Amino acid sequence: MSRTVIRNGLVVTASDETHADVLIEDGRIAALAGQGSAYAGSWTADDVLDATGRYVLPGGVDAHTHMDFPFGGTFSSDTFETGTRAAAWGGTTTIVDFAVQTRGYALREGLDKWHAKADAQCAIDYAFHMILSDVNDGTLKEMDLLVEEGITSFKLFMAYPGVVYSDDGQILRAMQRTAANGGLTMVHAENGIAIDVLVEQALAEGRTDPRHHGEVRKVLLESEATHRAIQLARVAGSPLYVVHVSADAAVAELAAARDKDLPVFGETCPQYLFLSTDNLAEPGFEGAKYVCSTPLRPHEHQSALWRGLRTNDLQVVSTDHCPFCFSGQKELGRGDFSKIPNGLPGVEHRMDLLHQAVLDGHISRRRWIELASAAPARMFGLYPKKGTLAPGSDADVVIYDPTAEQTLSAETHHMNVDYSVYEGKRVTGRVETVLSRGTRVLDCGTYVGRAGHGQYTPRGLCQYL
Ligand code: URP
Ligand code: ZN
Ligand code: ZN
Ligand code: ZN
């Protein structure tokens, strides 16, 4: 049996902050005990980590990533190997990535493809959601099988007509299915049909710069789609999780639904909290670096997102990590913003940016861990294996230095992408050591992980229902 003890740290979970020592046996948390207690003093271990002056945190759970993801004729630039390594550097020890059903093919085929991409490649544990591109009798039946084997959430797109778009009838049918099989429907809430009209008009008028990506993907078309998704979920009697919420009016739709006690949940991402349309408007095609959907919004929207995170109208912060290099990928859209592949790099920086939000007074320390670890684990059926430090939990542990300062930059990040959306941003706090199931992945700022350590992790049902 292997035994590790972490001594002298401040253990922070979503529910508690305690000066406790942590005993790890065979990859799981075996016990926590007060520092200086006879019990903690009695522990012997092969390996002792000193966390004096540090936080001891449950590893981050990033419930929204796209590794090696096809978009607009190219693929996101992080593989499961490079992307999970970068995640580990940033204190994330589990990702839930989106397997994609190719239109016309079975869900199973898409799932097999995602296993082929990810298996034996990951530095940290991983699980899958399923993107439905094609709702029909066959795929509806397959949803039941997937729920049984641990793929318990399904993303449907109200955007991207002709690609992964589902119409309202298809979305309703998928929701009815999850209402029956216990799965969770996730929706990308933007009115893609209306957006495509505005895209066509903008391009015809010569408005081709990246900033027009933000202008055509209007707040009203996010809030309208959010409202419609909620009503469809009510009709189906199903729960709903709205991904990458960016607009104040969309938060208001979620809040109104939750005030009616409806099982409606929402996620936002660091880019909507820290970046804005000002970035999309950067000159010289630099704005392309910030093209994602839903789009960045005027910074006035940020206060509603922060408030939603505090009031629990938004429950989760994920990254929607979907990197494309500026050179050769974002550049596909020079002269036509609609050809810029959508997505931003971010999997490495979520824990640090949210810690900065603690220092800035937006959220509490425990809320940081709730949003980044416990809530996504509960939402997607991974708790308490993931998302907390309790006896029996996987020993996915981050030793975090809350006073170290760092400057975020493409020069120093570990994501496989040639720019940073946070270039030059200074943050206080840094991941020092990371354990995944008790094994060191990052050791005092040195990467010691390996591709293939990460295990595929089937999930249970949403634990908020
Ligand atoms: O721009 C984004 N978000 N790209 C990834 C795909 C999606 O819609 O989440
Ligand atoms: Zn989306
Ligand atoms: Zn501004
Ligand atoms: Zn996404």
Image (cartoon, rainbow, N blue to C red):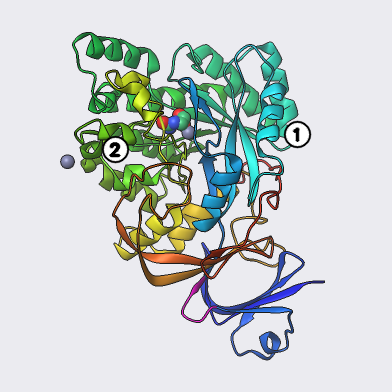
Of residue 147 and residue 84, the one placed in the foreground of this image is: 84
Q: What residue sits 33% from the left and 44% below the top?
A: 421
Query: Which quadrant does the C terminus fall into?
Result: top right
Disc 2 residue crowd, few under 14, some 14–19, many 20+, Cα 10 Å: many
Gap between marks 2 and 1 measured at Cα: 36 Å
Secondary element at tag 1: helix
Q: What residue sits 46% from the left and 80% below the top?
A: 53
Q: Which residues are magenta?
A: 51-55
Q: Which mark is residue 148?
A: 1
**Amino acid identity at mark 2:** Asp
Task: Determine whether 159 is above or below 183 in the image.
Answer: above
Residue 452 location (% of width, % of height)? 70, 49
Ligand 3 closer than 8 Å to the CB at disc 2? Answer: no
Residue 313 location (% of width, % of height)? 40, 44
Tag 2 residue: 248
Q: Which mark is residue 277?
A: none
The answer to which image quadrant residue 268 occupies is top left
**Amino acid identity at mark 1:** Glu
Task: Determine whether 138 is above or below 177 in the image.
Answer: above
Left or right: 342 as drawn, with respect to 6 = left
Left or right: 363 as drawn, with respect to 153 = left
Residue 170 location (% of width, % of height)? 55, 14
Secondary element at tag 2: helix
The answer to which image quadrant residue 117 occupies is top right
Q: What residue sits 35% from the left and 38% below the top?
A: 251
Task: Determine whether 41 is above or below 429 in the image.
Answer: below
